[in-house]
């Protein structure tokens, strides 16, 4: 079975232009009915001496689609993004969070860092097949396709 039928992919945050301010308004991910979530963040240009990192927070309640109520950092989830980490991706995978809602946080300071994309992939659905998230504009699944015109 294709992976796409077992996960729900959604936008965690739209691209963010060069800047040195934190990105604190990532979309909240509702984990009800899922075992885990993998956050994937792609960075573009990062200026020398930039202090950049990503982490995940959780909460039992969300205040809005982009804010948790009393969100708390998840221990050990912080990844430092090196200032020479241009055009690389960084991944944090949370399995069996203790609270219902998760939120990615992208921390930027001192120098510019570009965020190319941030996505969240929920997996371990308790009910299959997984319905595509509203953020997904289209997709296909193929099993052993023959060679030919795409």
Image (cartoon, grey):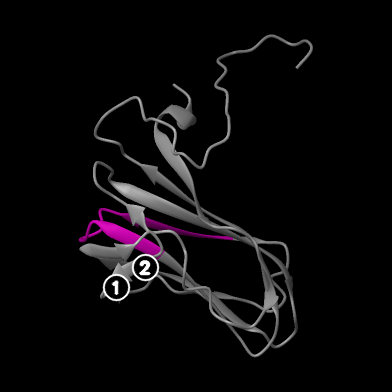
> What secondary structure do most residues of the magenta stretch adopt?
strand
Answer left or right for 49 relative to 141. right
Which quarter of the rendered picture does the C terminus lie within?
top right
Q: Quadrant of the N terminus?
A: top left
Instruction: Reply above or below: 48 against 15.
Output: below
**x and y percentages locating residue 117 in the rendered image:** 61, 57
Task: Please tell me which residue lies in front, 149 or 70.
Answer: 70
User: Which residues make up the magenta segment?
Assistant: 90-103
Crowding near pointer 1: few (<14 within 10 Å), some, many (20+)? some
The relative height of residue 81 versus residue 92 in the rendered view (above or below) is below
- Are the residues tagged 2 and 1 within 8 Å (C-beta)? yes
Q: Position of residue 3 (x, y in %)?
A: 47, 31
Q: Nearer the viewer, residue 85 or 127?
A: 127
Q: Residue beneath label 2, please?
A: 67
Q: Nearer the viewer, mark 2 or mark 1?
A: 2
Is residue 115 highlighted in magenta? no
Q: Secondary structure at mark 2?
A: strand
Percent position of residue 43, x then y: 66, 65
- What residue is shown with label 1? 71
**Quadrant of res 72:** bottom left
Question: Is 95 included in the stretch rendered in magenta?
Answer: yes
Task: Place residue 141 in its image quadrant.
Answer: top right
Q: State how many labels appear.
A: 2
Q: Say which of 53 and 11 sits in front.
A: 11
What residue sits 59% from the left and 79% below the top?
52
């Amino acid at each position: 079975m294709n992976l796409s039928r077992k996960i729900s992919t959604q936008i965690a945050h739209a691209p963010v232009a060069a800047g040195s301010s934190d990105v604190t308004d990532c979309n909240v991910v509702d984990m009800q009915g899922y075992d885990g979530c993998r956050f994937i963040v792609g960075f573009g240009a990062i200026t020398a001496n930039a202090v950049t990192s990503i982490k995940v927070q959780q909460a039992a309640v969300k205040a809005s689609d982009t804010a948790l109520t009393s969100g708390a950092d998840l221990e050990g989830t912080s990844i430092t993004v090196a200032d020479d980490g241009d055009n690389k991706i960084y991944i944090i995978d949370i399995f069996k969070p203790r609270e219902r809602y998760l939120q990615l946080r992208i921390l930027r300071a001192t120098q510019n860092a570009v965020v190319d994309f941030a996505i969240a992939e929920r997996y371990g659905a308790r009910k299959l097949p997984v319905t595509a998230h509203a953020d997904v504009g289209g997709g296909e699944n193929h099993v052993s396709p023959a060679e030919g015109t795409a």
